[in-house]
Amino acid sequence: MVDRPLRVAVVGESYLPYLSGVTVSTETLARGLRAAGHDVLLLAPRPAHDGEPAGAGAAGPAPTYAWLPSYQAPPPVPPGYRMPWPVPSAALQRARTFAPDVIHAQSPFVGGLMARRLAQRTGAPLVFTHHTRFGDYRHYLGPLAHAAARTMDAYLLDFWAGCAAVIAPGSELAAEISERLGGRKRPLVRVIPTGIDVAAIRELPPRDLRSEHGWPADSLVVASLGRLAPEKDVELLVEAFAMAGGRHPRLRLVLVGSGPSRERLTERVARPDLAGRVVMVGQLPRLDGLAVAHGADIFAFASRTETQGLVLAEALACGLPVVALAGPGVGDSIRPGVDGVVVPRPAQAAEATEALARAIADLAADEPRRSALAAAALQGAERFDVSRRVAAVVTLYREVLRPAG
């Protein structure tokens, strides 16, 4: 068992072509395991259109796919997000005959329950990656939010306890999970962030954002990539940029992404203080979005709900210094004063906006500092390399497979 390749069934609740941190992480894991010589069966919701979905740029050979019957989830779930039906299927039968050594769930819900049942039937240990801080999305439930949060907490505790191991992409989340589990011997809890193909990201050709958008050649471009949603605090980031831009007229901002805040943001950036200085390019394929980042000078980040902030590692691999408000996952990616600036997050939104604005303005005004941070970002990005992260996952698999005693 120590040396032989493993048979791993990865079970996803969402998958490509829907683009998110979870779907990127799932593809990265499956292809990374294949590149390391392991046999991978990926169970995921069947795409709306026949055929294998286009990849999001993860390195490694494609896994074998077993498509679960699926449907388009209703609002507030975004368009394109397909969910698996919890019914018997050829995909589940194929997973049983695959005879996996390990089942690796990417969600605790429908896909997670399928993974748990599959683990019970095959006798394989269940490993779970906790990708999302679900409590940070409770505002979408309106008056049901408080009761739903209590139910969710109890459910997650039960799901974790049924796993052989739980992977947290960030150290803060791992500490929270361990604390809630108390003194239980199992599951094992490990911090293993999602890796990225550092070399491929470095080699992406940068977009010429100044020419594309008619900006002056000496513009300093700030980029932000991610879902445009309240929990990501993109509106705060835009207000911080407006304040910073008032001090440094050369600043420009490009936003990559879409989501429920898009309409409000579109109205905001059309106002006189930002008109012509902010471009919202919408949702792009992952590598196209990173090519936009490659053409910028600074990466800005304000999200309150991350497990690791995968886009931060991607920005650093692009050679961008990062200015980020402190939050979950930020400390696992950014080395303050080395490759980025981490701003303590005041409790009041107005104070947080001012603090982020000041940090962006200060970095915009200090070209030698920007250059030093950018060089360190590029040089230090190897720590995010996918092969290292996948090797850590395989080590954990072998640990849970080791006979007790």
Image (cartoon, helix red, strand yellow):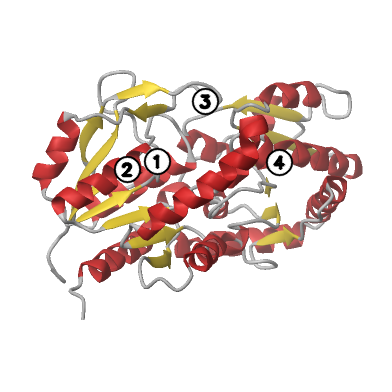
For the residues labelled 3 and 1, the Cα–Cα distance comes to 17 Å
Q: Residue at x 70, y 67 (%)?
A: 337
Q: Which residue is mark 1?
A: 109
Left/right placement of residue 332 relative to residue 210 reads left
Q: Position of residue 203 (x, y in %)?
A: 45, 47
Contact, mark 1 vs mark 2 (Cβ under 8 Å): yes
Left/right placement of residue 255 relative to residue 307 reads right
* Mark 2 residue element: helix
* Residue type (three-letter) at the residue carrying disc 3: Pro
Q: Which residue is mark 2?
A: 113
Mark 2 and mark 4 lie on one chain; the one further toward the N terminus is 2
Label ID, residue 233: 4
* Residue type (three-letter) at the residue carrying disc 4: Asp
Examine the rendered structure and indicate whether residue 129 appears above or below residue 3: above
* Residue type (three-letter) at the residue carrying disc 1: Phe
Contact, mark 2 vs mark 4 (Cβ under 8 Å): no
For the residues labelled 3 and 2, the Cα–Cα distance comes to 22 Å
Mark 3 and mark 1 lie on one chain; the one further toward the N terminus is 3
Q: Which residue is mark 3?
A: 78
Q: Nearer the viewer, residue 178 or 279?
A: 178
Q: Nearer the viewer, mark 2 or mark 4?
A: 2
Examine the rendered structure and indicate whether residue 154 appears above or below residue 241: below
Q: Residues within 10 Å of mark 1 (few under 14, many from 20)?
A: some
Q: Residues within 10 Å of mark 4 (few under 14, many from 20)?
A: some
Farthest bottom residue? 405
Label ID, residue 294: none
* Mark 4 residue element: loop
For the residues labelled 1 and 2, the Cα–Cα distance comes to 6 Å
